[in-house]
Image (tube, rainbow, N blue to C red):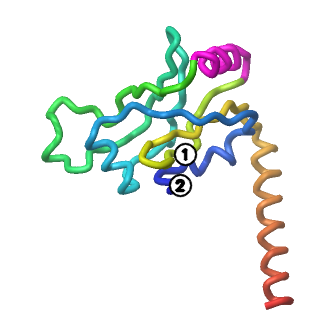
Amino acid sequence: MAVYIKNKKAGLKYEILEKFEAGVKLLGFEVKAVKNKMGSLEGSHISVRGGEAILLNANLPPYQPKNTPPDYDPVRNRRLLLTKKEISRLAGLESQRGLTIIPLSVYSKGKKIKVEIAVVRGKKKYDHRETLKRKTAQREMDREMKKKFG
């Protein structure tokens, strides 16, 4: 399982409540771009509309810009492939106040391209600081252990 694109700020900005795995409907040149780790999930989110889950604002530039159709939009909406049960669960969670659905990473599973999505709650400013403090403390402890035990 190779991870191609990660949403690095997701753990810092959001408290992750529940994770799901979804397939994503891509064009051929988008698949090539993803496999070459081109693209970004920053600022993207998932919306459930009309019984479908849709990935919004994910930037996947074309693999070869000169060989793509002239009307191609790299930030287009992409359909996520989920079961009806998962879609109804996500729709229920999305309707709750304060919850959002975001993509965490794009990776391969066999020959398929998958997206790991999560139901999240936004962190407050003091939560951000607490997370950074915890991360720094862990880094310091790891450094000291490495010095001590080599």
* Residue in the image at 31% along x and 37% along y: 74
Query: Residue 87 falls in which quadrant of the image?
Result: top right
Main secondary structure along the magenta-highlighted residues: helix
Q: Residue at x 47, y 23 (%)?
A: 54
Residue 19 magenta: no
Q: Residue at x 40, y 55 (%)?
A: 37
89 drawn magenta? yes
Residue 26, image x, y percentages: 35, 35
Disc marking residue 140: none
Q: Between 128 and 16, which is closer to the camera in this rendering?
A: 16
Look at the numbered disc 2 and give the secondary structure of its residue: loop
Q: Nearer the viewer, residue 31 or 143?
A: 31
Residue of label 2: 1
Residue 68 image point, x, y percent: 17, 40
Q: Which residue is mark 1?
A: 105
- The stretch of residues the image draws in magenta is 84-98
Direction from residue 60 to residue 122 in the image, left or right: right
